[in-house]
Every structure is written in structure tokens, then in C-alpha cells.
Image (cartoon, helix red, strand yellow):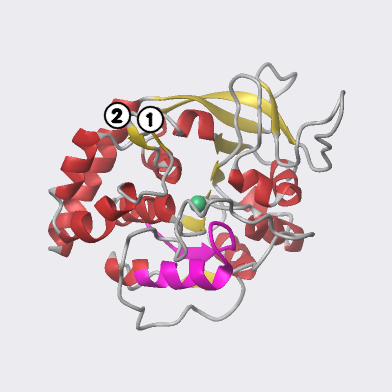
Amino acid sequence: MIIDCDPGIDDAMALALAAGSPELEILGITTVAGNVGLDRTTANALRLREFLDMDEVPVVAGSPGPLSGDRPPREGRPHGVSGLGAVVLPEATRPPAAGHAAGFLVEAVRSRPGEVTLVALGPLTNIALALRAEPRLAEWARGLVLLGGSYTGRPAVPDFNMAADPEAAAVVFGAGWTVTAIGVDAAGRARAGHAVVEAMRATGRLGGELLVPCVEFPGRARGDDGPAVYDVCAVAHVIDPAVTVTVPAAVTVETSGDDSGPGARPAPGTTLADLRPRGPGNALVATGLDVDRFWELTLAAYRGLGRRLG
Ligand SMILES: [Ca+2]
């Protein structure tokens, strides 16, 4: 698989899950502007690659902003100025690979048709650029699993990943493949409560230097049950699809929007899902999350990786 991301606290935890899952072959990490600017998401990905002992995995930088328009500022800096909250990792010693993420995605998928799953944890700009450059990407990829949108109940405001580049999201959902979409409604149930944090703390350097500072960063929105670890759910779904309940749907993404006045359209980036589509639809959307199964899988991977990292 290839992980397209904007690290990002929960991106970091998702990369740790991938690194701790030997059954996954990680062909690359591509970066996009999102939680923080592209320079920082790329620098963070490079640091995480070294910390997580993924030296053989190329990191390729992608788009510094959305397909068109300006990137909306990330309000309140929930990931901190660095993008990794309270995490302090050494500067990376190796640079990113040459080239652009979109080109890398196309070539990697073209060379292994039917085998490569794309996992998108940030704004969908890189995936959309890749699809525009090579529409057959949608045929060649084994699938795309993304974290974003909301598919149960009435969408209120769009989540960050969708709002950051609604046009890209519309390209991705309209590419002729079946997108697996884990929304923030389902993924928001994956919360790092007290018992989870203690289990993370017991994983050595991995817990002490990465996981616990991620979940204890004060800027993280949290309910009574601890902060949600959204992006981790998308990687968990690739490892074990049964962590989520998914149903076929026809999804469209609002791109124009107009949230002023009566009869206003939903804000740009709002996902509109028909869960009883005529025909096959264009997506499988998550309507539920098996929280126990999710944490069992995730903590087992963290424990294994923790032992490896010391
Ligand atoms: Ca992310």
C-alpha cells in the first residue's frame, strides 16, 4: 500500500500502525499540505520514517495547496505549530525522494496493477492530481481507502480533509472506482481512553516518545473518553476490514456551496451519501466501527513495533 498523508498527530499514529503490521508492504509515503504546510508534513513524514524504522520506504512530497483557491487555515492548530503536537523527534538525516507524489502514485500503481491499495489520510489533492494525469489509476489500483467525510445522519459541517480541498474530493469520488470512505462519524468512535493510553505507555520508546505525546497533546479535541485517533482507522481497515461496518453508497461532494441565507447549500466539502443507491454506487462507506476489535488490532501492532524499536 501507499500512504498519502499530512502528519499530523493521527497520521503519525496511523504510520506507526502500518510500521507495526508486518503483513503490510508499504511501497511509499506521500505527503500533502493539510494539518500544517507541505514543508512541515514532509519533514514530519521523514522524521517518522526514521523513528519507525521504515528506512526502505520512499517519502515523496506532493501538493502544497488545494487544486484551486486558497487553503483554509487550520483553525485552532489542533496539531500544534509543528503538526506533531508535543512530539519531539530528531531532524531526519535523509531527504525525500525526487519527484512529485502524483507521479509516484501513478508509476507505483501502474507497475503492479490490481495490487496496490492507496490510503489517503489528508486532503485528497495528490490523489486527484494523479487521477487527472492518469485516469486509469482508478482501474489499476486495488482500491482507495480514505479518511474523511461523514456518512451517517445528516451532514452538518464538513470535516477538515474534505473542506481543505472539496474539488479534489469530487474528482476522487467521481473517478469510476469504488472508494472506501471511513468518515469522521465512524472513526470518531476510536478514542484513546485511559486504558488505551496506559497500554501505549507500556510500549517503550514508541509509546513514550511518540504515541503518548500524541494523545496527550492538549490541543486535541477530546470527549470524556479521550481524543479520537481518526486516521488510524483507515489503516486498520486495510489490515482487517471487519473493524468497520461498510455499506454501498452513492456519494457526492459539495464543491460550490453557499452557507448563507435560507435554502442555502451545504458548505463546500460536505459529503452527501445515498445509502440506498440505485445500482452499485461509487463508494463503500463506514457506518460503524468495532471499537474493541480496532484497539485490539492496533495495540497488538504497537506492542510488536515497540519491542522492535526498544
Ligand atoms: Ca491526516
Residue 294 appears left or right of 259:
left
Q: Is residue 178 above or below residue 107?
A: above
From the image, tell me which residue sits under label 2. Answer: 293
Residue 95 appears left or right of 123:
left
Q: At 56% across and 37% down in the image, what residue appears? A: 180
Residue 121 appears left or right of 239:
right
Q: At 40% across and 38% down in the image, what residue appears? A: 228
Residue 177 appears in the figure:
yes
Percent of width and height locating residue 237:
42, 38
The residue closer to the viewer here, 133 or 51, is: 51
Does 128 appear in magenta? no
SS at badge 2: helix
SS at badge 1: helix
Q: At 48% across and 56% down in the image, what residue appears? A: 3
Q: Quadrant of the C terminus?
A: bottom left
Q: What amino acid is labelled 1 in the image?
A: Val
Percent of width and height locating residue 33:
59, 63
Percent of width and height locating residue 118:
53, 52
Residue extending farthest to the top is 276
Q: What amino acid is labelled 2 in the image?
A: Arg
- Tell me whether the residue at label 1 lies in contact with that at label 2, contact meaning CB atoms closer than 8 angstroms: yes
Q: At 41% across and 45% down in the image, what residue appears? A: 220
Tell me the distance, in whole angstroms, between the alpha carbons under discs 1 and 2: 6 Å
Q: Which residues are magenta?
A: 25-47
Q: Is residue 7 above or below residue 90?
A: above
Give the quarter of the image for residue 36. Answer: bottom right
Residue 24 appears in the figure:
no
From the image, tell me which residue sits under label 1. Answer: 243
Does 41 appear in magenta? yes
Badge 1 local density, few (<14 within 10 Å), some, or many (20+)? many
Q: Is residue 28 above or below residue 160?
A: below
